[in-house]
């Protein structure tokens, strides 16, 4: 990609010299103002905002007025509509620059951030039928195409552009700090230049996040990094889980290589960066696919394990007083039964998006036992609103029958808690650290976020 950019610059320089030579022989009567569709006026309010927000603060120049020099004379590319510029660059600021600045610091931004964004309205079409959404060059330039289709009311459009920006910035990082050698070997035998003929399903089965990722290692690294940062860990895990066994191993190996690259080669805590970007996508852009409710609706998470005694997160992040009382009541209720029982932990097990059973793990002496209680689940993937109702037992063994009936008086506080409240599914706890974010989730009582419970997620 870098060589292509240099070639285009060389071509443009030659073309410019040709024009100058021609003008020595005859005068050209050309009104250049008609060549720019936005009829530029110097120092508009938009220019002032771009200067104040990007040039003064980050030394980043934003070029949006049409100039063929920036895309080459072998393409026909439309100018960007002026009203698309500020929304797009606001997204660059919120979803890219500010998270990196917060996590990596101003020194990193000054050293690695691109010094120029060039904006065009249409895509740059290629001979193979595809079209380029963006390019990165020389470690300093990002050109973004197809901005005339940018729509702030379309959450998918915003996230799509953020993917493009993070993809190209990953190329810039790789141009300055080379990508890991181990990454290039993970799926070495299946890279193909003819990626346009590859389906999503084929790419997934081979261990790629997109067909384009299968074109070469550099694009693979950028696509996988972007998927982890912008689409999020839940999306990436779901994609890996739906791959072949070999494909899943490859995808998880790529994830590990990327995390190591950021942590060791760049000095950035990848998980902290991932969380910051996800928080923007979830809260600022309210992208539904970034919510816990969405992924619960997809049945990505099969278990929520609440082990107060052994999971240290309850000491660091806390637990709502209301649920702690419920948990303590179950423990004391089991102890009070005349059987010498000890409460270990409980879990919510989702056999489907609309089916769940509460499982109580308890001990009698050295023996461990289970008791299970069935629930139906009604979950709104958009709002997260969730209700639990009594379901049908999933079997007739002791866990569903004898044990469940035996200790039901002790478990009744938890059964009542689930049945008598309307909940909202969410990533919890809200103060989870970067290594726990997306690893824990649960539910809070509607209109009472302080009344909640959460546990370790299992897929």
Image: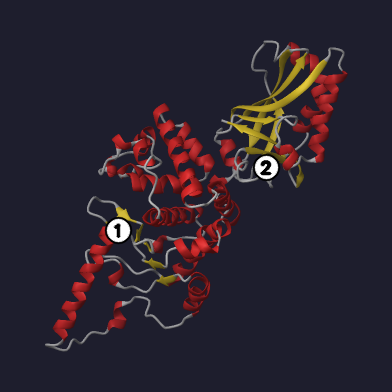
Q: Where does label 1 land, which residue?
A: 2
Q: Which of labels 2 and 1 is toward the front?
A: 1
Left or right of 318 on screen, residue 378: left
Which secondary structure, mark 2?
loop
In the rendered view, would you say 357 is above or below 367? below
**One can see residue 258 in this view:** yes
In the rendered view, would you say 122 is above or below 274? below
Which quarter of the rendering shows the N terminus?
A: bottom left
Residue 226: percent from the left, percent from the top?
45, 49
Tag 2: Cα neighbours inside 10 Å, few (<14), some, or many (≥20)?
A: many
Q: Where does label 2 land, which residue?
A: 428
Left or right of 325 on screen, residue 266: left
Which quarter of the rendering shows the C terminus?
A: top right
In the foreground, 319 or 354: 319
Residue located 82% across and 25% down the image = 331
Residue 305: percent from the left, percent from the top?
67, 30
How far separated are the C-alphas under marks 2 and 1? 43 Å
In the rendered view, would you say 49 is above or below 415? below
In the foreground, 360 or 256: 256
Residue 289: percent from the left, percent from the top?
54, 45
Residue located 29% across and 51% down the image = 130
In the rendered view, would you say 198 is above or below 355? below
- Verify CB contact (< 8 Å) between mark 2 and mark 1: no
Left or right of 226 on screen, residue 380: right
């Amino acid at each position: 990609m870098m060589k292509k950019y240099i070639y285009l610059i060389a071509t443009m320089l030659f073309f410019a010299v040709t024009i100058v030579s021609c003008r020595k022989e005859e005068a050209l009567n050309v009104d250049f103002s008609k060549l720019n569709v936005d009829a530029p006026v110097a120092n508009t309010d938009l220019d002032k905002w771009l200067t104040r927000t990007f040039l003064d603060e980050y030394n980043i120049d934003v070029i949006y007025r049409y100039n063929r020099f920036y895309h080459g004379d072998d393409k026909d590319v439309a100018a960007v509509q002026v009203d698309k510029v500020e929304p797009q660059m606001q997204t660059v600021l919120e979803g890219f620059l500010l998270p990196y600045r917060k996590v990596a610091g101003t020194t990193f931004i000054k050293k690695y951030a691109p010094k120029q964004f060039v904006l065009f309205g249409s895509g740059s079409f290629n001979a193979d039928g595809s079209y380029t959404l963006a390019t990165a060059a020389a470690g300093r330039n990002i050109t973004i195409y197809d901005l005339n289709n940018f729509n702030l009311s379309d959450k998918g459009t915003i996230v799509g552009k953020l993917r493009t920006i993070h993809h190209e910035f990953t190329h810039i990082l790789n141009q300055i700090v080379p990508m890991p050698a181990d990454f290039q070997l993970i799926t070495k035998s299946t890279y193909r230049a003819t990626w346009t003929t590859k389906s999503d399903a084929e790419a997934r089965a081979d261990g790629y996040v997109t067909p384009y990722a299968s074109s070469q290692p550099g694009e693979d690294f950028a696509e996988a990094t972007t998927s982890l940062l912008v689409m999020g860990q839940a999306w990436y895990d779901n994609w890996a889980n739906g791959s072949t066994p070999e494909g899943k191993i490859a995808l998880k190996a790529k994830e590990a290589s990327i995390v190591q690259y950021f942590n060791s080669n760049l000095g950035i805590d990848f998980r902290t960066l991932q969380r910051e970007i996800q928080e923007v996508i979830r809260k600022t852009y309210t992208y539904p696919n970034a919510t816990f409710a969405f992924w619960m609706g997809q049945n990505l998470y099969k278990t929520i394990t609440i082990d107060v005694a052994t999971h240290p997160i309850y000491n660091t992040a806390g637990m709502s007083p209301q649920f702690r009382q419920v948990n303590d009541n179950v423990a004391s209720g089991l102890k009070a039964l005349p059987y010498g029982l000890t409460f270990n932990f409980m879990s919510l097990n989702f056999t489907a998006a609309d089916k769940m059973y509460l499982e109580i793990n308890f001990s009698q002496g050295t023996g461990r036992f289970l008791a299970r209680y069935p629930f139906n689940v009604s979950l709104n993937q958009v709002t997260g609103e969730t209700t639990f109702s009594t379901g049908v037992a999933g079997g007739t063994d002791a866990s569903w029958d004898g044990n469940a009936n035996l200790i039901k008086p002790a478990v009744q506080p938890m059964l009542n808690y689930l049945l008598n409240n309307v909940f909202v599914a969410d990533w919890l706890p809200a103060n989870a650290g970067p290594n726990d974010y997306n690893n824990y989730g649960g539910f809070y009582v509607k209109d009472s976020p302080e009344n909640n419970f959460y546990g370790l997620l299992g897929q």
